[in-house]
Amino acid sequence: MPLFHDQMHRHIEIPAKPQRIISIVPSQTELLFDLGLDAAIIGITKYCIHPGEKVKQKIKIGGTKELDINLIKSLKPDLIIGNKEENERSPVEELMQHFPVWMSDISDLESALDMVSKVGEITDCATHAQDLITRITQQFNKLTIKPSNHLSIKPSQNRVAYFIWRKPYMVAGKGTFIDDMLKKFGLINVFEAERYPEITSVQLQTVNPDFVLLSSEPYPFKEKHIHEFQALLPNATIKVVDGEMFSWYGSRLLQAPDYFEQLFDNQ
């Protein structure tokens, strides 16, 4: 079998054209469908929600962190595609003992596009994947509108806190894909800690961001939560945002630039 390497620098033997693929990451599941691999996909997680009608027809093999190992083994995949951050190490390592497991490790747009390229290679969809990369790159190259243009504020007033959880408060910090997406839109993350630190309301008030973005996932922030943050930061702009646009690193990246540009319209 051909030898490939994943984004964790592991070498994996994978069939030349996998026929039984399991994806254990939602954004990469959507990518596989968009590469035209519908027939080869035999299992996905319960959190794989795109594309809507197609995922309903696939076997659910648990959650991203609670995989049904026995069910996966019974499906006899010839390729499993996962992610270092979204999947737990122990069950993934168990699966590696039985099946080819290709892992992504993504922290920015560049590594996301590298993932798309490599997934295209291992699934015999390289041409389609390169076309997708070209279109995503073109979309991001056209991304020029910044929040300050919409809000008529000083260019320096672009400091942001991006919340992913409530009780306790958790934010996206440095070294995350979300942080890189914020940079692409000209925003500066006010939290310097790595990954996803817990913070207090006092810490939030101390850094005093210009914008607070409340993600729709993994915590389902709603409009009703805006008042909670407005009370802490009366001068900040608080918005509930589509978390998929900031954290899904597959083919959904095609939609992200337009979403970013529209996000601050009609303020």
Image: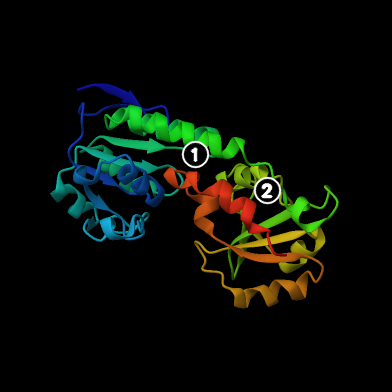
Residue 37 point in image, percent of width and height: 25, 41
Residue appearing at x 20%, y 30% in the figure: 17
Q: Is residue 98 above or below residue 224?
A: above
Q: Is residue 52 above or below residue 104?
A: below
| Quarter containing the C terminus | bottom right
**Which residue carries the number 1 mark?**
106
Residue appearing at x 43%, y 32% in the figure: 8
Residue 77 point in image, percent of width and height: 19, 42
Residue 224 point in image, percent of width and height: 61, 78
Q: Amino acid at mark 1?
A: Ile
**Which residue carries the number 2 mark?**
193
Residue appearing at x 86%, y 51% in the figure: 154
| Quarter containing the N terminus | top left
Q: Which sits earlier in the primary sequence, circle 1 or circle 2?
A: 1
Question: Which numbered marker is on residue 126?
Answer: none
Q: Is residue 156 above or below residue 12?
A: below
Disc 1/disc 2 C-alpha distance (Å) = 18 Å
Q: Is residue 13 above or below residue 45?
A: above
Q: Amino acid at mark 2?
A: Ala
